[in-house]
Image: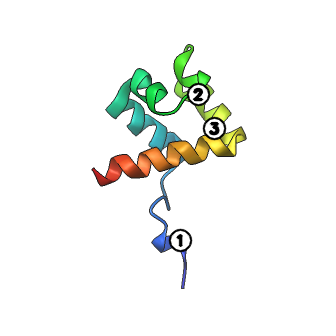
Amino acid sequence: MSTSSNNPLHGVTLEAMLTELVARLGWDGLAKRIDIRCFKSEPSIKSSLTFLRRTPWARQKVEALYLQSRKG
């Protein structure tokens, strides 16, 4: 039995999460909720993905915000 079926993030890419959060909150709203410079200074999906892939604590915050936004 696979544990991935219990993971709510299974099959959701980081890019898809970030794109949805930006569509819902905008870059300003995202920067207010997660204090990361790549969301504040000349934000782009590409630069944010590069940073998030290299920074586990920041990625965890984005994943948590994504899950929270999916509940409500």
Which class describes the residues within 10 Å of circle 2: few (<14), some (14-19), or many (20+)?
some
- Whole-percent x, y for residue 24 in the image: 32, 33
* Residue at which label 3 appears: 52
Residue kind at label 2, given as amino acid type: Ile
Check residue 4 in the rendering and tell me which mark sits there, or answer none. 1
Residue kind at label 1, given as amino acid type: Ser
- The reply, left or right, for residue 61 in relation to residue 19 is right
If you read the primary sequence from the N terminus, does the residue marked by circle 1 or circle 3 appear first?
A: 1
Q: CA distance from mark 2 to mark 3?
A: 10 Å
Q: Quadrant of residue 65?
A: top left
- Tell which of 59 and 50 is nearer to you: 59
Rendered-image quadrant of the N terminus: bottom right
Q: CA distance from mark 1 to mark 3?
A: 22 Å
Front disc: 1 or 2 = 2
* Residue at which label 2 appears: 36
Q: Are the residues at dot 1 and dot 2 in contact (C-beta closer than 8 Å)?
A: no
Which class describes the residues within 10 Å of circle 1: few (<14), some (14-19), or many (20+)?
few
Callout 2: SS: loop
Which residue is at a point 53% across and 18% down the rendered structure image? 40
If you read the primary sequence from the N terminus, does the residue marked by circle 2 or circle 3 appear first?
A: 2
- The reply, left or right, for residue 71 in relation to residue 22 is left
Which residue is at a point 47% across and 73% down the rendered structure image? 5
Callout 3: SS: helix
Residue 43 visible: no
Q: Quadrant of residue 42?
A: top right
Which class describes the residues within 10 Å of circle 3: few (<14), some (14-19), or many (20+)?
many
If you read the primary sequence from the N terminus, does the residue marked by circle 1 or circle 2 appear first?
A: 1
Callout 1: SS: helix
Q: CA distance from mark 1 to mark 2?
A: 29 Å
Q: Is residue 31 above or below residue 17?
A: above
